[in-house]
Amino acid sequence: MKTLVIVAHPERTNSGVQQFLKESSASLVDVTYHYLDEQKPTIDVKAERHLLRQHQRIIFQFPMYWYSAPALLKNWIDCVITEQRNHLNLEGKELGIVISMGLKEEAFQAGGKERFTLSELMRPFEAISHACGMTYLPIFPIYLFTYQTDEEKKNLLIKYQQYVTMHFPQNFASRETWFLTQLKQKMTHSNLSNEQRDRLIQLTDVIKENRHHLTDLLTTLDEMRMEE
Amino acid sequence: MKTLVIVAHPERTNSGVQQFLKESSASLVDVTYHYLDEQKPTIDVKAERHLLRQHQRIIFQFPMYWYSAPALLKNWIDCVITEQRNHLNLEGKELGIVISMGLKEEAFQAGGKERFTLSELMRPFEAISHACGMTYLPIFPIYLFTYQTDEEKKNLLIKYQQYVTMHFPQNFASRETWFLTQLKQKMTHSNLSNEQRDRLIQLTDVIKENRHHLTDLLTTLDEMRMEE
C-alpha cells in the first residue's frame, strides 16, 4: 500500500508539530509527502491527479484554521477533485485526516469550549470521502503538541507512523504485524551492529511467541462464550 | 440594522442564481454587497475589518463547493478573522449563510445521496459564530435554482429579501412589520402614479386591519388556554 500525505500548512517551516511529523516519517517506506506551501500558486491539476492515482491512502495533514482546513487545502480540493471525479479513480481508496490544534481535547464536545466534536466539524471531508466512494479513516488529532512530554511525543510518533502506513481497522493483530514489518525493515539496514541485530531478532521472537499465546487465549475465550 | 452580504463565487458573472439574488436586492436599503471575486488577490485586512464593524448582520453567500464554501471565502476568513477577534467586535452580531446547490433538498439527510444535513455540513460556520459570540441564523438554502418555476422564484425573492433585512426570529408579527416597512419605502418613490400610490395605501390598511384581528384572536386564544 502506498500513502500520499498532502501537507497544507501556510507557515510550515515555523511549525514545531509539522517538523516533528516530518522527522517521524523519515524511515517510512512507500510514503510520499506533498507540501502544498511549496507549490506554485497555479495548481498543475494534471500532475496532482497523477499523484493521487499512484497512491491508495490519501491523508490530508493540516493545522485547524477556523474549525476546518486552511484555504490552501480547500483551494487544492476545489481545483483537483472536480465533477469528473470518476476519472480520478478514488473509489476504494482511503481518506485520512491528521489535524493539529492549540486546544485541549475536552474543548471539542457538546458543552465544551468549542461546542462540537472533531467528527462533526470534519463532516465536509467525510462527505467528500463518501461522494468519491472512499473509505473514511478515523481522524488523527494532535492536541497541544507544544505541551506534550517526551514520553507523549514518543507515543505520538509510533501512533502517527501507524496511521500513515498500517492497515485499518487497527486492532491488536494488525499492530503486531505492523511491528514485525517495521523490525524486518530495520534489520535490512546494513549499518547495524551485530549486537543491535541480535536484539531485533530477539524482539521479533518475543512478539511472535506472544502472538501464539494470544491465539490460544482467544480460542479459550471463544470456548467459554459458547458454553455460556 | 445594517447588513453586509459577502458574496464568494469564483465564477459569479456566469451564475444565474447570483445574478437573480443581485437583482432581488436592488431595492433594499441598509444592505452592502461585497464581492470577493472583485477583490485584489492580497486582502486589505484593515479595510475588510472596517467593513465588518459597520454592519450588524453578516451574511456569507456562496455556491456549495465540496460540502463547504469555495476556497475564496475560506481564505478571506483565515485572513480577516484572526486570533484578535475581540478587536473585531463581532459579539452580538448575526451570522447568516446563503448557500446554493445543484442538488435536491432530500439529498441532504441520513440515508440520502449526500448523507449529511446542511446544518451538519455547515458546522464550521456555526462554530465560528459561537467562538465570536455571534447569533447564528438559520441557513438559507437554494436548491436547484435553474429548475425553479417563475412562481417559486418570486417566492424565493421575497424570502431572500426577508433573510437579508428582517429581524430574527422570523414569525408572523415580524413578517407583517417587514411588509409594512417595505410598502412605506415604496411609497416614498417619487415616480409612482397616483393609482399605484392608492393601491399601496390600501394594502397597508389591509395589513394593519388584519393585525388588529390577529391580536384579538391571540388574546381570545390566551384566555381559552388560561381556562383549561
Image (cartoon, coloured by chain):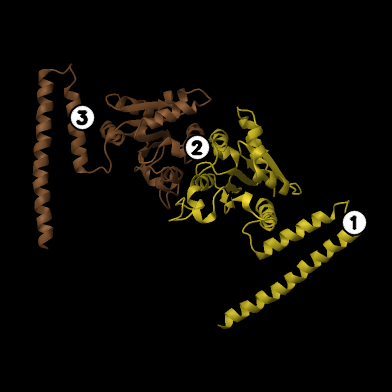
Chain colours: A yellow, B brown
Q: Residues within 10 Å of mark 3 (few under 14, many from 20)?
A: some
Given the image, what chain letter belongs to the residue carrying mark 1? A
Q: Nearer the viewer, residue A117 or B147?
A: A117
Label 2 packing within 10 angstroms: few (<14), some (14-19), many (20+): few
Residue A154 sits in which quadrant? bottom right
**Residue lying furthest top:** B191
Q: Are marks 1 and 3 on the same chain?
A: no
Which labelled disc corresponds to residue B43? none
Residue sitting at 19 percent across and 42 percent down? B173
Nearest to viewer (mark 2 / mark 3) = 2
Tell me, yes or no, whether the two marked residues, 2 and 3, touch with CB atoms within 8 Å.
Answer: no
Which amino acid, mark 1? Ser
Q: Nearer the viewer, residue B177 or A120?
A: B177
- Viewport quadrant of the C terminus of chain A: bottom right
What residue would you read off at disc 2? B82
The local secondary structure at tag 3 comes to helix
Is label 2 on the same chain as label 1? no
Q: Pointer 3: what residue?
A: B182
- CA gap between label 2 and label 3 equals 37 Å
